Image (spheres, rainbow, N blue to C red):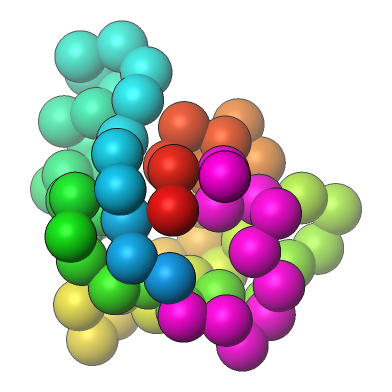
Amino acid sequence: MPLTLARAGEQKYIKQVGGRTETRQFLEKLGFVAGEMVTVVSEISGNVIVQVKDSRVAISKEMACKIMV
């Protein structure tokens, strides 16, 4: 399921990061790699704030749809 469907407080493992090469590379630099644990901190209108690798990152709904958990 895409990261946008995870609820606040849920911890999930990233299974796959999709999208174009540039998008995947951008998300990988932020720490979104397969096998990594992410925690949804909050969600507003589909945009999410997540904790990944000891950092909190805000990503858009479009980006979050490309991250499968």
Q: Name the residue: 55% across, 75% down.
A: 40
- In-front residue for pair 8/22: 8
> Please, what is the dominant secondary structure of the magenta stretch?
loop
Q: Name the residue: 23% across, 36% down.
A: 26
Q: Position of residue 42 (x, y in %)?
A: 68, 77
Tell whether position 35 is magenta. Answer: no
Q: Among all residues in the image, which is located at the extreme right?
A: 45
Residues drawn in magenta: 1-11
Q: Position of residue 16 (x, y in %)?
A: 29, 39
Residue 17 visible in this rendered orientation of the protein? yes
Q: Please, is residue 66 above or below residue 2 in the view?
A: above
- In-front residue for pair 27/5: 5
Q: Please, is residue 62 above or below residue 4 in the view?
A: above
Residue 60 visible in this rendered orientation of the protein? no
Left/right of residue 44 with respect to residue 36 in the rendered view? right
Q: Quadrant of the N terminus?
A: top right
Q: Position of residue 51 (x, y in %)?
A: 39, 78
Tell whether position 2 is magenta. Answer: yes
